[in-house]
């Protein structure tokens, strides 16, 4: 039988998966996890207003969703004090990263990111044949000076920065980010991934500017809002950049239930404030558990804590495997020297109690 004529690029790609989900791990293990604290989900749960809105929207699921995401874009625009034309709603940040790669990457185009930063970005770039250059972290932070210098050196078309960072949870303040943007080559587009910004200190995000076509800000309902399973996020960009997404995006990609849930969650600022408080308390508990076991938690501006296990990657991996064997789902950074850490997601006390129980034995 004839094989499909895949492109040379697709034939050359390795069959990588950016993240193996906990469900796949549970199937492989033949049993469920007792604590799901590895994917930076928000187990404190979404706004009840959002779940009610989603239940109502489910009854209308026979209708296609509004492909312009109009009501949500209007609400986001009002929330941020910008115009709806500056907002692109998409299938989570992951989906939007795919569109950005599709808009900017042809085979061989130079892209710069940090070594060990968010792998889904790399996955999308590789899918269009981009040439990635990886800049080492410095002191567990993405290294702004080195990223800018490398972008100049390679004449990069696309640069990625997560602030706060995943997997380390470290962050730069708004002034440092603004200096970084000024230092980038004029022809480079910055993907500024702010997945965790709603949980970060208030001076983490620079003011939104909608006149600069060189920066796309990415936000999500997956983390602080507790709606990871809905698959909805948005980009903030200069209007012509935002409009260009319409050439490549899946116009009906964001479903009705997601649009309704996100809109209701956006309007429940009281619940978001509550989640911020619960998240901070859970991060303190993770710090306490880590220290009680002689480990060093890194300061985090996100909904997880990277815990330095004090030795090399092989040791941290053994700790991770020991936790998984004790039914605790956690993840860890992929590359050295970050991989001396495990990464534990903020969660309700019952989940953290399972972790606290398992950790000494895993060590
Ligand atoms: C969790 C995470 C995402 C994924 O966001 P979605 O909106 O759920 O696709 C993107 N970037 C970073 C840095 C993340 O940690």
Image (cartoon, rainbow, N blue to C red):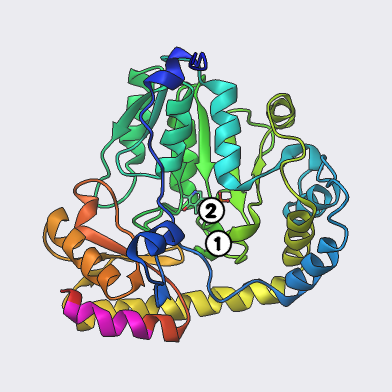
Classed neighbour count for the residue bearing mark 1: other residues with Cα under 10 Å, few (<14), some (14–19), many (≥20): many
Residue nearest the observer in this picture, 75 or 122: 122
Residue linked to disc 1: 223
Residue nearest the observer in this picture, 184 or 343: 343
Left/right placement of residue 78 relative to residue 136 reads right
Residue ID at (50%, 41%): 178
Numbered circle sitting on residue 340:
none
Q: Earlier in the sequence, mark 1 or mark 2?
A: 2
Residue ID at (76%, 45%): 82
Prevailing SS of the magenta stretch: helix
CA separation, marks 1 and 2?
A: 7 Å
Left/right placement of residue 355 relative to residue 39 reads left
Question: Magenta stretch containing residue 82, yes or no?
Answer: no
Pointer 2 residue Cβ closer than 8 Å to ligand 1:
yes
Residues in magenta, as a range: 353-361
Numbered circle sitting on residue 195:
2
Question: Magenta stretch containing residue 359, yes or no?
Answer: yes
User: x and y percent of residue 209 in the render?
Assistant: 65, 40
Q: Is residue 333 above or below residue 321?
A: above
User: x and y percent of residue 357 in the render?
Assistant: 27, 85
**Badges 1 and 2: C-beta atoms under 8 Å apart?**
yes
Q: Quadrant of the rendered structure where residue 237 is?
A: top right
Viewport quadrant of the C terminus? bottom left
As helix, strand or loop, the secondary structure at mark 2 comes to loop
Residue ID at (32%, 79%): 355
Pointer 1 residue Cβ closer than 8 Å to ligand 1:
yes
């Amino acid at each position: 039988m004839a094989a499909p004529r895949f492109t040379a690029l697709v034939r050359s790609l390795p069959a990588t998966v950016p993240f193996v989900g906990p469900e796949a791990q549970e199937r492989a293990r033949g049993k469920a996890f007792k604590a799901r604290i590895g994917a930076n989900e928000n187990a404190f749960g979404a706004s009840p207003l959002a779940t009610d809105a989603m239940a109502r929207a489910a009854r209308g699921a026979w209708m296609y969703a509004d492909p312009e995401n109009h009501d949500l874009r209007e609400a986001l625009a009002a929330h941020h004090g910008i115009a709806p034309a500056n907002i692109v709603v998409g299938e989570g940040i992951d989906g939007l990263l795919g569109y950005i790669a599709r808009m900017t990457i042809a085979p061989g185009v130079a892209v710069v990111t940090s070594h060990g930063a968010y792998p889904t970005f790399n996955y999308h770039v590789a899918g269009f044949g981009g040439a990635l250059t990886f800049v080492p972290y410095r002191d567990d932070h993405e290294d702004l000076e080195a990223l800018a210098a490398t972008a100049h050196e390679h004449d990069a078309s696309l640069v990625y920065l997560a602030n706060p960072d995943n997997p380390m949870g470290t962050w730069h303040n708004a002034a440092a980010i603004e200096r970084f943007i000024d230092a980038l080559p004029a022809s480079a587009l910055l993907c500024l991934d702010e997945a965790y910004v709603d949980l970060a200190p208030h001076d983490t995000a620079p003011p939104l500017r909608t006149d600069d076509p060189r920066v796309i800000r990415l936000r999500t309902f997956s983390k602080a809002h507790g709606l990871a399973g809905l698959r909805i996020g948005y980009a903030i960009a200069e209007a012509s950049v935002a409009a260009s997404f319409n050439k490549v995006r899946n116009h009906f990609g964001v479903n009705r239930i997601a649009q309704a849930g996100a809109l209701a969650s956006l309007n429940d600022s009281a619940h978001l404030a509550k989640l911020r408080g619960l998240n901070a308390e859970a991060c303190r508990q993770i710090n306490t558990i880590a220290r009680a076991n002689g480990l060093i938690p890194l300061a985090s501006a996100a909904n997880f804590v990277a815990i330095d296990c004090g030795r090399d990657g092989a040791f941290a991996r053994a700790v991770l495997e020991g936790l998984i064997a004790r039914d605790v789902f956690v993840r860890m950074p992929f590359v050295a020297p970050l991989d001396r850490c495990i990464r534990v997601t903020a969660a309700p006390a019952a989940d953290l109690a399972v972790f606290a129980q398992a950790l000494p034995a895993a060590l």
